[in-house]
Image (tube, rainbow, N blue to C red):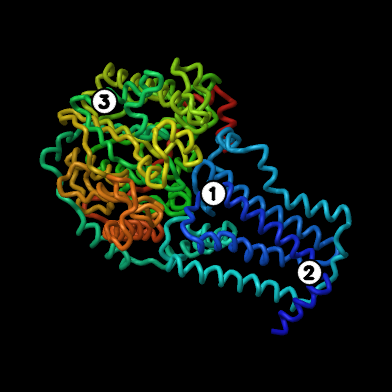
Amino acid sequence: MNFFKRQFEDMRTGKLSFFFTVVVLFWIKTYAVYLAEFNLGIQNALQHFLLFLNPLSSALLFFALALFWKGKGRYIAFIVINFLMSFVLYANVVYYRFFNDFITVPVLFQAKTNNGLGGSALELLSPIDILYFSDLFIIIGLMIMKKVKPQEKLRFRSVFAVMTSAVLVFLLNLGLAEIDRPELLTRSFDRNYLVKYLGTHNFTIYDVIQNSKTSAKRALADSNEVSEVENYVKANKVDPNPEYFGKAKGKNVIYVSMESLQNFVIGKEIDGQEVTPFLNSLVEKENAIYFDNFFHQTGQGKTSDAEFIMENGLFGLPQGAVYMTNANNTLQSAPGILKGEGYTSAAFHGNYKTFWNRSEMYRTMGYDEFYDATYYDMSKPEEQLPYGLKDKPFFKESMPMLKELPQPFYTKFISLSNHFPFDRHENDTDFEPGQFGDGVVNRYFQTANYMDSALEQFFNDLKESGLYDDTVIVLYGDHYGISENHNRAMEQVTGEEITDFKNAQLQRVPLFIIAPGVKGEVNHTYGGQIDVRETLFNLLGVDNKDYISFGQDLLSKDRKQIVPFRNGDVITPEYSDIKGVCYNNETGQPVEEGSNACEEASKEATKRLELSDKVVYEDLLRFYKPEGYKQIDRSDYQYINPNPKSAENPEASQEESHE
């Protein structure tokens, strides 16, 4: 107790008065930012109190570090610490404005590979954001005007007492949080929960610790760890539908990632004009299966998560992207598995190979070829985006390379045009932007229309080349395009209030499977990206019973219609468990208190996510070798282009080198 007596004595004599001024200013600013920028789902008075309280412990702790200095050194330390903490807070604000999520350590490491997105980031900035550094300006102003007393040297015990008080405030914060959300730090997949209860800076500390533990998990894992996963997966395998099994045996495969395309645009009209007339036509096509209750399940890895999920039957990670943090894992991916069936594999992307670390990840997954931006004509500014080639030239220039591939082939095309902030296509289509009072939402329909036109051109080229009739084509939306920050405009688009329940339903993305000899239909089964690999393998007649996969064939009559989201939410045909609230899908309203309508599905979803994370974090597939699978040797895959087009475009080559 003497520690605290000394602290109070220092407060009485004014030695800590400026310290507490700095702490209180930062505390109040952080709380104001929470209210202004983040939608954390506050549901009761305790949660609101915790939101107010949680910035205090980190402010006390970090600003206490400045107390080890005296005089001008302490002033400088206050300024530096405030700037760094304000920057972390503001970086999360900008990130949240689009992703509705918070920055994690893996995201910071993957940022260097995502050059070309500067324009997207600028779209998220606002001139009034300077107010988020207002306390820093006040501190500097007080120092300049000499309104603070000289900073005397403090006893170590006083500084230690301040730090101890920070720990006590945090423990109080955590104890109250555990009352409202038991096992908060051990069972939550949702960063919204962690920030709501603990704050952005405490979450950052937690994230650093979690990533350190993850590195240790792989080092400590052994072959016995895979047994639980294998037993679960085999117990939950479903029998393929005999009506579809092997219908497309030996056919080529083309995946097309439709950037940021959500399902609400299918059939949508703006001023009497269809947004996606070509995709709309596929809904009624005789050999196209359209899944209208199909959801993306991506996390922070967005497009890369979608690729990973669909080709590996594993979920993305709760923090960061597998493409960045686990690119050297042992995987049993679709390209590698189909190699055993005689398939050649190739990926096509109008950006450079380092974007999302694809050059490394595609080696791990067993791709034979990777056609990146160096294979395309990148010399025409009007065909460029900050993050790659526009869709029409991309698909057009891909055709000669596609036709040269040995058949059967397994290929993937990653489109780019319909990418936030959905601009630079006003001269590429006569489709007018929407009029919903939000530039991002307005332009979204224009770029979606352009992408739709590019897809129609691609299909026509496939038919002209003779490939169409021998190819299974899988068109899928990779992730959402319009975040919650645009809910006001989206309410005009949908004609409904965008609640948490409605926002979860808007995470539907289109899935079309077009296959020769397969009868077309609109399929209403509930499913997600995790289910696509199983579906494709059964259409191709590939025996996949021994492979680890957490998906189930979308065409199977025995499948469980459970759709887990990366944040722990789950949707079924009848109920949706969103942010801890169970909703009736028919009414969109919460079910009666005490009902366990969502309990079984939520437990099942949590189990799948936990086991999938275990596989990825511990790299368990290095211990699991199904019969007949030849392990990928990454050294075989160099993707050497003997005559890259970027050699004709020095500027493009320089950009690649920079990345």
The x and y percentages for residue 599 are 29, 60
Image position of 463 with respect to 540: above or below: above
**Taking 300 as reference, is 139 left or right?**
right
User: Distance from label 2 to label 3 (Cα)?
Assistant: 70 Å
SS for dot 1: loop
| Residue in the foreground of this view, choosing between 222 and 433 | 433
The x and y percentages for residue 406 are 28, 29
User: Distance from label 2 to label 1 (Cα)?
Assistant: 32 Å
**Taking 644 as reference, is 591 left or right?**
left
The x and y percentages for residue 651 are 59, 26
Circle number at residue 38: 1
What residue is shown at x 51% (from left), y 31% (from top)?
440
Q: In which quadrant of the rendered view does residue 523 lie?
A: top left
Question: The N terminus lies in which quarter of the figure?
Answer: bottom right
What residue is shown at x 75% (from left), y 76% (from top)?
7
Residue 621 visible from this viewpoint: no
User: Distance from label 3 to label 1 (Cα)?
Assistant: 39 Å
Circle number at residue 534: none
Q: For mark 2, what is the residue?
A: 16
Q: Earlier in the sequence, mark 2 or mark 3?
A: 2
The x and y percentages for residue 140 are 80, 52
Q: In which quadrant of the rendered view does residue 608 lie?
A: bottom left
Q: For mark 3, what is the residue?
A: 282
What residue is shown at x 54% (from left), y 51% (from top)?
103
